[in-house]
Amino acid sequence: MTQAPAIAVENLVKVYKSVTAVAGVSFSLPPGSMTALLGGNGAGKSTTIAMLMGLVEPSAGTVHVLGARMPGERYRVLHRMNFESPYVDMPMRLTVRQNLGVFARLYGVADVAARIAALADDLDLVELLDRPTGNLSAGQNTRVALAKALLNTPAVLLLDEPTASLDPDTADWVRARLDKFRKENGATVLLASHNMGEVERLCERVIIMKQGRIVDDDTPAALLARYGRATLEDVFLDVARGRGEAARAQLRQDAGDAGEKPAPAREAAQ
Amino acid sequence: MTDRADARRAAGAAAMPAAFSAARVGAMVLRYSYLLRSSWPRILDLIYWPAVQMLMWGFLQLYIAENSGFFARAGGTFIGAVLLWDVLFRGQLGFSISFLEEMWSRNLANIMMSPLRPAEFVAALMIMSLIRLAIGLVPVTLLAIAFFGFNLYGLGLALVAFFVNLILTSWAVGIFTSGLLLRYGLGAENMAWTIMFIFLPLTCVYYPVSALPDWLQVIAWMLPPTYVFEGMRALLIDKVFHAGLMAQALALNAVFFAAGVFAFLAFLRSARRIGSLLHTGE
């Protein structure tokens, strides 16, 4: 039996006054998958994620998360979702323990103290728990934000630049924790990132956006092969600078010869 | 994927959160109380200005009373007025500042993305408004007794009626202002600080409604606090409690409160459309 997708997006459009931020995006993510959303500034990644969270209402199209249509039915599923973004902070005067305690209660975590202790242990926050959140370094703040995002053991986790501001060692360590969390809990993870190494290591699928549209969607290995590049960073640059069109045209031709649709269209048709 | 994951998913699917949760309201109250306790300037600020105002109006009343027979009979009207005005003004400010704390700390998206529902958020802000009001006003009412022998609590049950009506108006305006902040971001912050001042001349805090021109009296009687301040003067000067005035104020407050909630929800919908929940700057 085919599992219902954890996230299903169909013909999603968002127009702000005269600016089209998202222009007809479709994709679906199966439960337990980890997918990267790539794209330059203004590609529409943040707006897409905001619509997945129910913070922004689509102009057209639909978003379903765990079977609930967003934003109308968001309260059915918000307790099973969470997110982390560098553009959102936690109250700085509160200690880490107080902040995590407040959010644990908002998410209905059963044993708040035990959950905070477990996360602090796992994310190396024990020494930070009783320090004001505003006194932490950027890297420590990122780890606290990650702890907040994992408080309710979410079934859907949305991450915006999860390792921003972290040194390479800590970033690598955080990636390992995310991977472990996903595998242990079967969570569906969608992450927006500019760190291509991170994407290659963590994600089995990459969706590339440009000017509000999906321009490519495949596994990292398939993208590397299609663009004839050694790294996803080069693929990203090809797409950003318009050099990827030839590769995609070739893909469309190959797919046409074989009677198939190219990856993004295939996804949209699902 | 593990068995544990399947079990957790099944459990999560079954656990639909309650439509209104006292625990989530409590979590928000806890969050604001942590903030208050961590900052003595915030607590001092709650007491400072009400105390200054009460002292100023109290001494003014003493001076006038010594030189006017009417004001000698109307003992306490200015002090009573300034204390009740503070219930109205500080009640709204307590509500709005707690809301603003989320915007100042860039925490609003965390809150809006959590299972906290708008009604729970509003309930937590109301509770914080009462807590902040108590911290600010109780010491000042005691000062009024010490300096001027004016005992606000001596108004008895009438004080309850005055307080309920004033706090309801303050919450209605606070809910409306929070909606404005959601929709327009910190660009609307000044409204949160100043919106209540339009009530100061129109609700006749320090003078009777009859002092207004006829056309303005019509507007004044549309505002619930006008009934409270008229009722207070009747009680202090004529020693009469007009229950009818309080009932009229309560009915108007029901309309104000409903309008505030309606506006808040409309602003929230609009904020979702324009994407201002994620970016709450200027």
Image (tube, coloured by chain):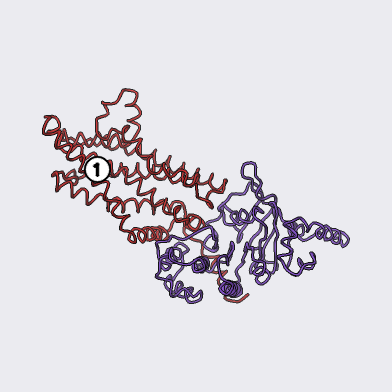
Chain colours: A purple, B red
Q: Is residue A103 above or below residue B90?
A: below
Q: Give how far across and how far down residue A95 sits, in percent.
A: 40, 66
Decide which of B176, A99 is in the foreground and name it: A99
Q: Is residue A129 left or right of residue A179?
A: left
Q: Quadrant of residue A80?
A: bottom right
- Determine crowd level at label 1: few under 14, some 14-19, many 20+ residues with C-alpha closer than 10 A: some
Q: Farthest residue in the right direction? A: A257
Name the residue rendered at 86%, 59% in the picture.
A253
- Left or right of residue B199, residue A118 in this image: right
What's the residue at 61%, 55% (across, down)?
A: A46
Task: Evaluate whether residue A106 shows in this view.
Answer: yes
Question: Does residue A214 appear left or right of residue B193 in this picture?
Answer: right
Q: Position of residue B246 (x, y in %)?
A: 28, 37
The residue at the far top in this view is B214
Provide the chain ID for the residue under circle 1: B
Percent across and percent down for residue B181 are: 46, 46
Kindly state the secondary structure of the residue where label 1 is placed. Answer: helix
Q: Is residue B175 left or right of residue B78?
A: right
In-front residue for pair B32/A32: B32
Is A9 situated above or below B49? below
Residue at the spot x=50%, y=44% of the render? B184
Amino acid bearing label 1: Gln
> Which quadrant of the figure has residue A98?
bottom left
Q: Vertical placement of B28 versus B55: above or below?
A: below
Residue B244 position in % (x across, y down): 26, 34
Specify the quadrant that holds the N terminus of chain A: bottom right
Q: Which residue is mark 1?
A: B53
